[in-house]
Image (cartoon, rainbow, N blue to C red):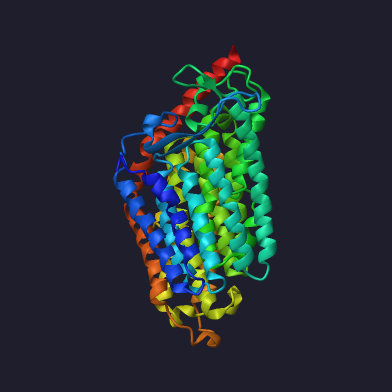
Amino acid sequence: MNNFPILSFLTFLPVLGMLIVLFLPKKEVQAIRITTLIVTGLQIVFSIILVMGYNYSAGGINDANSFQFKEFFNWISISDFAGIGKIKIDYFLGVDGLSTPLVLLTAIVTFIATLSSWNIDKSVKGYFLMFLLLDTGMMGTFVALDFFLFYIFWELMLLPMYFLIGIWGGPRREYAAIKFFLYTLFGSIFILLVMIGLYFSSMETLADGTRVFTFNLLELMNTANYTETGILSPLNPNNLRLVAYIALFVGFAIKIPMFPFHTWLPDAHVEAPTAISVILAGVLLKMGTYGILRIAYPIFPEITYQLAWWIALFGMINIIYGALAAMAQKDFKKLIAYSSVSHMGFVMLGMSALNTMGISGAILQMFNHGTITAMLFLIVGVIYDRAHTRDLEAFGGLGKQMPIYTGFVTIAFFAAIGLPGLSGFISEALVFLGGFGSGTTRILAVVSTLGILLGAAYMLWTMQRVYLGSLNEKWKDLTDLTGREYAMLVPLTIIVIYLGVNPSPMLNLMNASVNAMVKFIADAQVFYSSINTL
């Protein structure tokens, strides 16, 4: 596999699928669906090959040799552009212990979402064209190691998601799509400004001795690759680095979404088709925390160290506020949307600990939440397809009418609560172990445990209202799961149970990279402290 461009294949396979779909007649609905299913199925196969071929012992944060399955060539090179010097943008792909789990997650969730999209009957060809384009944007974001390339993939997701919500969504789809677009674009502007500032503050020495500016993320992490006069150079300490970090953090935090930038999420989830809600919660939210870990943390390690308490504070707010908001909902889908806000708060809390346990727990929570919340939104979709309502007060006793479906619901709900033996438990446990182990975040971690109690409260209350008690006679004709719905829920259930019992393979996958990140931030803090002292 070292000679095969597997990352490019994973990223651009959906584009090939788009070309096939584009030339299929729009009346060939089944052929369009099957083509998309084959493409996303191949992504799973190659992502598994990627994991199996991964060297678990290799780890680093700013060293190209620590990244695996690398692909590199100079993409754009202009010797003298508008008098500002040489422009150099690289096509640089690679994975490590941080990105590999998310590549696998993206492949799994996208395949499941394809099955969930089988009942889309409005402009099927246009839907799957946008779906595959979104797939490329997500996968590319997790493997790009050049900031410019990362930004292209990041922005590429915006257009298809806008149309997928705005055309195929619910009654208020236009409002939800525009709100999502504006919020995300607002954050992207911040990311763009910081990217430009870093570019003109940095330099890279080529083989012939020429010095050029760089977008290479690994070069941007190294202090030596900066000019002393660059406005965002660590060699030129000033408050602009703090401003840039906050701007970059906010740009990524909107996608998490972090309070108070979360208000786009419930509207987008409620109006989006089930499959798009699955992708939105399962993958897109993780791109915010991934961006912070991949870019903000290692490029601004001293600011990360200084603001760790604030990151933990906002994580705690997300956990408690999201849980309270979920408890107040009467719409089943909106309840799950707010539960995502709460569970992403655990990711932020773990990240803020700046130790191996905390960050490992955060990354594992990103993966586990992706699979668990995918199950939860599929569960809502199953009942909505039959009852055409999401009103929690309208149900009751569905466990008697749909016992197999209710069994999957029970597993998903208890995984979301964090029941031992299911995947949600171990990631949350590591987050709290990391939070307690850090003197900076210990008190906030203690307060955040309230989120576990609140999560159990709203999940069990929902279980009681919808699935237990006497059957509402209005729903006495509802049928249990179909074969397609089994195909969606069974793989996710297996993952949730397997990682609950044996999380070691996933933790081993990320361990070397996480250790390298923790050491890098700690060493950088010592270095920057010496600069400020001088």
The percent position of residue 430, horizontal first and vertical second, equals: 43, 45
44 vs 437, nearest the viewer: 44
Q: Quadrant of the N terminus?
A: top left
Which picture quadrant has residue 269? bottom right
- Please tell me how many numbered marks the rendered image carries: 0
The percent position of residue 353, horizontal first and vertical second, equals: 50, 37
Position of 290 with respect to 239 (left or right) is left
Give the answer, above or below, for where 309 lies relative to 499: above
Position of 188 with respect to 504 (left or right) is right
Residue 512 appears in the picture as rendered: yes
Give the answer, above or below, for where 318 lies relative to 210: below
Residue 426 appears in the picture as rendered: no
**Residue shown at 46%/18% (left/top)?**
208
Q: Quadrant of the C terminus?
A: top right
173 vs 150, nearest the viewer: 150
**Residue shown at 60%/50% (left/top)?**
257
